[in-house]
Amino acid sequence: MNKTLLAEFTAREGAEDEVARLILEYAKKVREEEGNLAFDVYTKASAPRAYWIFEVYRDEDAFQAHLRAPYGGPFNTALAPLIEEDASVLTFLDPVT
């Protein structure tokens, strides 16, 4: 079963360009992961500093491999001071069948 989630965070005022650069660079790496099926980066139309990242992994093992990727920690460390939240807010999703 796929592992699907929505990650949300809000760029601090003045950090918008750096956040965009970081997340787009990170997205390229994640999309190359064997078990990644989607890593789509959005901003909210009515609040462009609000980011929503829709992520889909082949299964739980692929998601765990994503969490162990060597570039994840440095990305989160660089992102943390640039966003309003303490970290990305994760919402795990289940399909309606």
Image: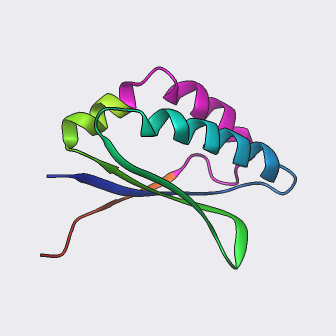
Would you say residue 20 sits in the magenta stretch?
A: no
Name the residue at 54% across, 38% down. 28
Q: Indicate the quadrant where residue 13 lies.
A: bottom right
Residue found at the far right of this picture? 14
Name the residue at 47% across, 20% down. 70
Eyeballing the image, is 97 above or below 9?
below
Screen quadrant of the C terminus: bottom left
Name the residue at 22% across, 65% down. 94
Eyeballing the image, is 15 above or below 92?
above
| Magenta range | 67-88
* Marker count (numbered): 0
Residue found at the far bottom of this picture? 46
The percent coordinates of residue 7 (x first, y second) are 48, 55
Name the residue at 59% across, 25% down. 74
Residue 69 in the figure: left or right of residue 37: right
Residue 32 in the figure: left or right of residue 58: right
The percent coordinates of residue 32 (x first, y second) are 42, 33
The percent coordinates of residue 31 (x first, y second) are 44, 40
59 or 31: which is nearer to us? 31
The percent coordinates of residue 67 (x first, y second) are 38, 32
Eyeballing the image, is 16 above or below 96?
above
Which color scheme did the rendering employ for the protein?
rainbow
Would you say residue 74 sits in the magenta stretch?
A: yes
Residue found at the far top of this picture? 70
49 or 35: which is nearer to us? 35
Residue 43 in the figure: left or right of residue 57: right
